[in-house]
Amino acid sequence: MKTRGEIKAHCLSYDNVYEDYPFHDPNWCVIRHRENHKIFAWIFDKDGNVWVNLKCDPQWTSFWRGAFNSVIPAYHLNKTHWNSVILDGTIPNHDIHTMVKESYELTK
């Protein structure tokens, strides 16, 4: 998974979610829950790649960061609870899907 379209489509496949642009900047797309409006994915372009910030249980943040060089402390968010996932093709899709699902569950 490397494109904005791929990550957006995956995030939008979850129940009762919607796409939003809260900063009126097309670079910053967020995916929210319809019921509580909480964000579970922040999608943006940075340094030539698509990035997605995902919420993570603090017990797992360091695991993901250690497993992949493309998972780092979140850009512009709480680094204890959020990771930035750089979609550069080095992370298997099933691992990205696992991180997205965890973020979805933690925020719903």
Image (cartoon, helix red, strand yellow):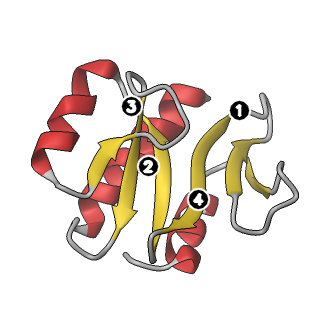
Which SS class for mark 1? loop
Q: Viewer-nearest of labels 1 and 4?
A: 4
Name the residue beneath numbered marker 2: 100
Say few, some or many: other residues with alpha carbon within 10 Å of mark 2 (under 14 / 14 to 19 / 20 or more).
many
- Is 90 positioned to the left or the right of 77 in the image? left
Query: Mark 1 packing: few (<14 Cα in 10 Å), some, or many (20+)?
Result: some
Where's residue 28, x and y in %? 70, 59
Amino acid marked by disc 2? Val
Q: CA distance from mark 1 to mark 4?
A: 14 Å
94 above or below 48?
above
- Along the polypeptide, which appears first: circle 2 or circle 1? 1
Label 3 vs 4, first from the N-terminus: 4
Point out residue 104 in the picture as x, y percentages from the top left corner: 53, 39
At label 3, which amino acid type do we have?
Cys
CA gap, disc 1 to disc 3? Answer: 14 Å
Q: Report how far apart the C-alphas of labels 3 and 2 lie in the structure.
A: 9 Å
Residue positioned 45% across, 70% down in the render: 47
Would you say the residues marked 3 and 4 are in contact, meaning their CB atoms lie under 8 Å apart? no
Occupied quadrant, residue 37: top right
Q: Helix or strand or loop: what does disc 4 sit on? A: strand
Instruction: Tell me the mark number nearer the camera, choosing from 4 and 2.
Output: 4
Q: Which residue type does callout 4 highlight?
A: Ile
Q: How many marks?
A: 4
**Which amino acid is tagged 1?**
Lys
- Name the residue tied to disc 3: 56
Residue at image coords 53%, 33%? 77
In front here: 90 or 16? 90
Q: Are marks 1 and 4 in contact (CB under 8 Å)?
A: no
Q: Quadrant of residue 90?
A: bottom left
Name the residue tied to disc 1: 38
Q: Residue at x 40, y 78 (%)?
A: 2
